[in-house]
Image (spheres, rainbow, N blue to C red):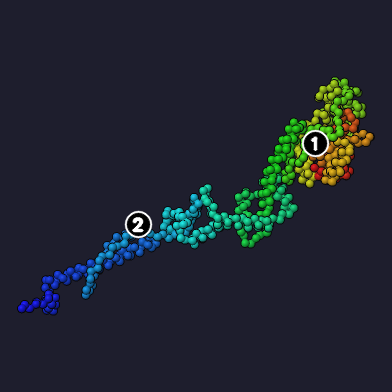
Amino acid sequence: MDIPTEPEDNVFEENSADGNVTEETATDENIVEEQIEEVNVTEEIREVVETEVTTVTKKKRRTRKSSQMVPRKRSRKSVKSVEPEPEPEPEPEPEDEEEYEVETILDHKVEDGEEYYLVKWKGWSEEYDQWLSKENMSCPELIAEFHEKNGGTQTPTDDNAGDDSNEQSKSDSESSDLQKYIESIWKPKHEDIEMAIKAVCSVSDKSKNNGMKGKKEEDLNKYAYMVFQKKQKLVQMERNLMMQLLTRDFRKRRADQLLQLKRWEEDINKVTCGKPIIKVENSVDLEEPPIGFTYINQCKAGPDVIIPDDPAIGCSCSDCNEGQKNCCGALSGGVAVYTKAGRLKVEVGTPIYECNSRCLCKEDCVNRVVQRGSKLKFCIFRTSNGRGWGVKTMELIRKNTFVIEYVGEVITNEEAERRGVQYDSEGRTYLFDLDFNDTDCLYAVDAAHEGNVSHFINHSCDPNLAVFAVWANCLDPNLPRLALFAQRDIHSGEELTFDYASSKQTGKYREFCVNRNVN
């Protein structure tokens, strides 16, 4: 019977115990050592891969490291027994998926309804600044800080931008608060209003503008918001803001006023055809052209009034000089009333009879002055002393020169009495009684709603004009024409005035010699 032999492991142990290593034993030992070394290399590769993956998920560095690293060999360590493990598959490296850190926000815009911010990356130069959509950003603190530094300005929009309800609501709220604040300081005094009006109307010193230098609309809005935002309100600053806003409003009204005054001036000169030449000027206030006033050149007949213009007689003079005894002018007291230059030679109160359509003399007759009309240059202007509109001459007027005819609607005395009651209640009247005869006054001239430049001539206790009754084509003694002549030399730019009391006009006002506004 065969005896079984001992296993080879026992042989290996015996040989090892004896200290003698056989060839088979040495081969086994080499295999184990190679397996251990492979395991160590595998562990090192795994550590390197994990380290590299961790690195790419951190902040972006100035220089990028390669993910392909060669592992270092470690020194061998003795292990008793190591089972070989399968080599792990390394995780694939994400393609350029590094995380950036925003250092600050530089700008903001909206395109196609989406907000974008210009960001600066931490650790990167400005050439790498980049616009990012708000949806792709996760730094609300920096966004809030950016808007706070920029004064809480509302989101800008482009042509295609949608409405941002939050920003619009904030803007509406700020506008409402600003409007309430302005209303709270809007307490202009009378002198403030006068100063603002003078600032926009004055033409004497445009450079200084009376100390009120107006701001542009955009600058004024910014200034108003700046004053509103101040925590400590300054009284002088608030008053300055109020005056600036007041001046702005008046400046808009001034532009419209100047346009209307220019149109009125053009309409007047179309009627006068240069006889006379009229200019309109207002450098005092914001008063516009009078409403309900029609400019006319000669008197017109009112209800129940007929103005005859076909005289029964006329002179037969071919040359109406001073020596002609049968000339119309001789009827004014036996002498001619005008010089060859057309100036008066008679005293105030003397009736004047000019040549008429029945006379044989020509249109350039020296005794035809009032009927030819005025050739002077006048300016309807706004007075600075509260008397409303006035009239001044734009050229030198010599003494005894015919200036202008007082024209209007010729009405009966009864109608004049009725209108006079209404005019007196309003504190004004333009009724001029035609009572140059010894008989009762039958007619009056009302220039309230229809008239010429004489409508705007003011009263004075020391007038430079006087009223004369003149007859020409109408020889009715109760229907004379009213002519104003210069009582002295009147310089260019001087205001024209006459004494209302001399007209014996209907109404309480005309009985007193006072300077006041009747326009």
On the question of residue 474 being in view, the answer is yes
Indicate whether 44 appears above or below 389.
below
Tell me if 78 is positioned left or right of 234 in this view. left
Q: Which mark is residue 451?
A: 1
Circles 2 and 1, Cβ within 8 Å, touching? The answer is no
Kindly identify the residue that appears in the image at 60 percent across and 57 percent down.
173
Q: Which mark is residue 511?
A: none
Tell me if 478 is positioned left or right of 18 in this view. right
Judged by depth in the image, the label closer to the viewer, 2 or 1, is: 2
Q: Amino acid at mark 1?
A: Gly
Image quarter for residue 456?
A: top right
Regarding mark 1 in the picture, which secondary structure is present there?
strand
Observer-nearest residue: 421 or 353? 421
Image quarter for residue 393?
A: top right
Q: Which residue is mark 2?
A: 95
On the question of residue 406 being in view, the answer is no
Q: Amino acid at mark 2?
A: Glu
Of callouts 2 and 1, the N-terminal one: 2
Kindly identify the residue that appears in the image at 69 percent across and 46 percent down.
253
Residue 63 percent location from the top left of the image: 36, 59
- Looking at the rendering, in which quadrant would you find the C terminus? top right
Work out how far the residue at label 2 is from the one at label 1, CA to CA, in angstroms: 94 Å
Residue 372 percent location from the top left of the image: 80, 28
Tell me if 63 is positioned left or right of 141 in this view. left
Observer-nearest residue: 167 or 273? 167
Residue 158 percent location from the top left of the image: 52, 49
Indicate whether 259 appears above or below 106.
above
